[in-house]
Image (cartoon, helix red, strand yellow):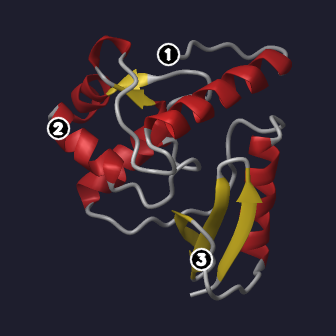
Amino acid sequence: MPQLSLLTPLGALTLSEDEGAIVALDWGRGRDQEETPGLRAAADQLQDYFDGQRAEFDLNLAPFGTPFRQRVWAALRAIPAGETRSYGDIARLLGSSARAVGQANSENPIPIIIPCHRVVGSGGLLGGYSGGEGPETKRYLLELERRALRLTPGQQGSLV
């Protein structure tokens, strides 16, 4: 499986591709590096994201997961940059429980690109985050989007 690592403000991240689609984003540097056009596009879009030049991703994604997890991850991708939703909001949308949504969120194989950091606890509490330094990484990503949206005319959003 081709992989490509990149350095970001959060440290090294490694993208993995299978059959032309991004299937994973992992924290840390991958051992085997093999650049493909899809991995290069994903790395470039992530760099633009961290540079505040991009708030959404336009990539071919194929995360491995159950049909329910696929539905949760699709709902996450529908949350606009600069906005958050609660686990309960997503659960109501999908006719599920907040706990099941939280579990699927924690199993997201492509964090940042599938924006699980945009999901917060009830009452707007930040909640946990399974990547990087946990909640501090989540806070960083939300603040990064807030700054990027302030620099992009015509977009608005509210973050925790």
Residue nearer the viewer, 140 or 2 = 140
Residue 102 visible, this orientation: yes
Determine whether, in the image, residue 94 is placed left or right of residue 144. left
Depicted 104 relative to depicted 23: above or below: above
Which label belongs to residue 160? 1
Seen in the image, is 80 located left or right of residue 119? Answer: right
Closer to viewer: mark 3 or mark 1: 1
Mark 3 crowd level (few <14, some 14–19, many ≥20, 10 Å Cα) = many
Q: Which residue is mark 3?
A: 17
Mark found first going from the N terminus, 3 or 1: 3
* CB contact under 8 Å: marks 2 and 1: no
Q: CA distance from mark 2 to mark 3?
A: 29 Å
Q: Identify the amino acid type marked 2.
A: Arg
User: How far is the residue under mark 2 from the one under mark 1?
Assistant: 20 Å
Q: Tell me what residue is drawn at x 82 percent, y 46 percent.
A: 48
Q: CA distance from mark 3 to mark 1?
A: 32 Å
Where residue 6 appears, as percent x and y from the top left, is: 74, 65
Give me the residue at 28% from left, 50% from top: 104
Q: Earlier in the sequence, mark 2 or mark 1?
A: 2
Look at the image and tell me whether residue 78 can be seen. no
Query: Which numbered tag is attached to residue 99?
Result: 2
Sequence-earlier tag: 2 or 3: 3
Q: Position of residue 84 (x, y in %)?
A: 47, 23
Q: Say which of marks 2 and 1 sits in front.
A: 1
* Amino acid at circle 1: Val
> Is 156 placed left or right of 62 in the picture?
right
Looking at the image, do the residues carrying marks 2 and 3 touch, with CB atoms under 8 Å apart? no
| Image quadrant occupied by the N terminus | bottom right
> Residue 38, located in which quarter of the rendered image?
bottom right
Q: Is residue 98 above or below residue 153?
A: below
Label 2 residue SS: helix
Q: Tell me where residue 155 sits by quadrant.
A: top right
